[in-house]
Image (cartoon, rainbow, N blue to C red):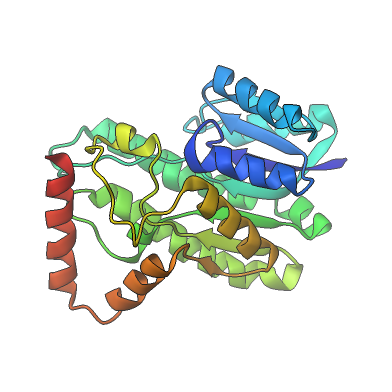
């Protein structure tokens, strides 16, 4: 069984950047997302740079059988995960009571259930390979978010779950890292329904910078990675900011993003 790195949500944004970073460091990749053409283009681009051509698996991770299908595909290829990168996810801006309920439940399926399933499904090969799990969360995971309530809650779950799993799996030689970026200009904003405003430079990071920080943090066995000084400062300030004030600030921010 040859080792591979699974990367979900690889067809755009941070996922694409993570694929390039892991490829540069010699990892053989299995890229997973819904958009087959995008995956093929990314695989071609990585191979054109002289790295091993990534495997691609176009599936919808929101499906209940997604992890079984990934396992079957790996078995047919004689491969097993060395690293699992859970990057797939999306958000929606708006009041939870006003947004489409089915879409919000689909968000939970992808951001929470699928991530949990993939984090736990391959623990044995991860232990055998002394590999790891990189779960992409967000600075949003550090507080509730009126105006994006379900998204913020899903990322809070990712942070909490990943930190606990870091502690549980460390004695087994498996690294678990939660990557918590702030604003990153990607397709995420279009899917979420937010305006293409200019983000404050102090907290904005490129997808490439986030991917590099995430890779280094995982390899170093860090529990939590928050890219950028501004974002690290924000997470620290949230610890001492009165909760009502923080909630009011997030709500005002989400209203502005929709304008």
Judge by depth and name the residue closer to the eye, 50 or 118.
Answer: 50
x, y percent for residue 251:
14, 56
Q: Quadrant of the N terminus?
A: top right
Q: Is residue 72 above or below residue 93?
A: above
Judge by depth and name the residue closer to the eye, 137 or 104.
Answer: 137
For image coordinates 43% across by 45% down, the residue present is: 111
x, y percent for residue 87:
52, 45
Residue 93 position by quadrant: top left
For image coordinates 23% across by 38% down, the residue present is: 194
- Left or right, 193 with reference to 255: right
x, y percent for residue 192:
29, 37
- Left or right, 61 with reference to 191: right
Q: Is residue 212 above or below residue 240?
A: above
Q: Is residue 32 above or below residue 206?
A: above
> Can I make out residue 73 in this image?
no
Spot the residue most to the bottom. 240
């Amino acid at each position: 069984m040859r080792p591979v790195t699974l990367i979900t949500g690889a067809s755009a944004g941070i996922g694409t950047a993570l694929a390039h970073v892991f490829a540069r460091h010699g990892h053989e990749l299995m890229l997973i997302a819904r958009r087959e053409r995008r995956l093929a283009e990314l695989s071609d681009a990585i191979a054109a740079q002289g790295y091993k051509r990534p495997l691609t698996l176009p599936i919808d991770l929101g499906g209940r059988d997604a992890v079984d299908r990934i396992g079957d595909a790996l078995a047919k290829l004689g491969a097993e995960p060395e690293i699992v990168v859970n990057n797939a996810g999306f958000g929606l801006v708006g009041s939870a009571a006003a947004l489409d309920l089915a879409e919000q439940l689909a968000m939970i399926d992808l951001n929470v259930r699928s991530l949990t399933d993939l984090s736990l499904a391959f623990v044995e090969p991860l232990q055998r390979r002394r590999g790891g799990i990189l779960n992409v969360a967000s600075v949003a995971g550090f507080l509730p978010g009126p105006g994006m309530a379900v998204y913020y809650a899903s990322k809070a779950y990712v942070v909490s779950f990943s930190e606990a799993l870091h502690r549980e799996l460390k004695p087994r030689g498996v690294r678990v890292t939660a990557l918590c970026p702030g604003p990153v200009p990607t397709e995420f904003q279009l899917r979420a329904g937010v305006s293409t405003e200019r983000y404050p430079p102090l907290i904005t990071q490129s997808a490439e910078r986030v991917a590099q920080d995430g890779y280094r943090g995982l390899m170093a066995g860090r529990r939590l990675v928050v890219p950028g000084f501004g974002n690290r400062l924000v997470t620290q300030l949230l610890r001492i900011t009165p909760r009502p004030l923080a909630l009011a600030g997030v709500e005002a921010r989400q209203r502005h993003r929709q304008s």
